[in-house]
Amino acid sequence: MLQRIEKLLLELAVLAVLALGLLISASVVLRVFFNSGIPDTIVMVRELMVAAILLPLAAATSARAHIVVEFLTNQFPARVQGWFVVFGTGFGVLALAPLIYAGWNETVHSLQSGAFYFGQLNLPKWPGHLIFLIGISFCWLRLLLLVIADLKQLRAGLPVADTQATAPSHDTASRGEH
């Protein structure tokens, strides 16, 4: 079920990127050729960027596709690398918790107060806050599930999935020796 939700969030992020491209292109064309524009373009672009960046976070986390720097940790055995992965993922769980709390507070506040962006369209603030909260919450949930799964792997004496491909290899083929 979580994978379906992650896929949906990823597809929504793709739609946000496409909408960004169309919105910016239309705005530029209108400005160049008709000396006009789309009202509140900056606000809409800002809100669509939130969706484009945060909605796919859970899917990226599930695929372990975040940027990592491994030049030092690759020198350790696979089991130690696994503990580094668990530490990093656990740190992510702790780091996102205050963001979820703040996102919840901002979403509730913007819904209760009816806050909006001042402009020609008076767009409400709550959709962007809600998108932020959804994106961060599903990323946090995926991180938590990864920590639990990785700890089970390590306790069973198995390597963490993230470290299997990065463990130092000692065969001669990988070093180019024949």
Image (cartoon, rainbow, N blue to C red):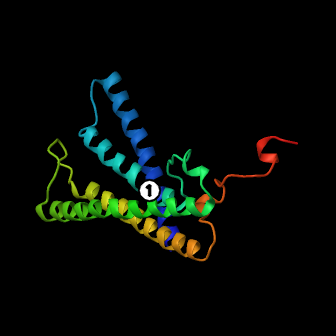
Could you tell me which residue is drawn at 32 percent across and 42 percent down? Answer: 45
Residue 84 image point, x, y percent? 50, 59
From the image, tell me which residue sits under label 1: 57
Could you tell me which residue is drawn at 30 percent across and 48 percent down? Answer: 47
> From the image, which quarter does the C terminus lie in?
top right
User: Is residue 107 rendered to the left or right of residue 156?
Assistant: left
Residue 149 image point, x, y percent? 53, 72
In this view, which residue lies farthest toward the left?
A: 113
- Circle 1: is it few (<14), some (14-19), or many (20+) Cα within 10 Å? many
Of residue 157 and residue 129, the one placed in the foreground of this image is 157
Could you tell me which residue is drawn at 75 percent across and 52 percent down? Answer: 170
The tally of labels here is: 1
User: Is residue 137 rendered to the left or right of residue 60?
Assistant: left
Picture quadrant where residue 34 is located: top left
Of residue 137 and residue 151, the one placed in the foreground of this image is 151
> Of the residues shown, which amino acid type is indicated by label 1?
Leu
In this view, which residue lies farthest toward the right?
A: 178
User: Is residue 69 rendered to the left or right of residue 108?
Assistant: right
Dot 1 falls on a residue whose secondary structure is helix
Residue 134 image point, x, y percent? 35, 63
Of residue 92 and residue 51, the one placed in the foreground of this image is 92
Residue 159 image point, x, y percent? 62, 66
Could you tell me which residue is drawn at 39 percent across and 60 percent down? Answer: 91
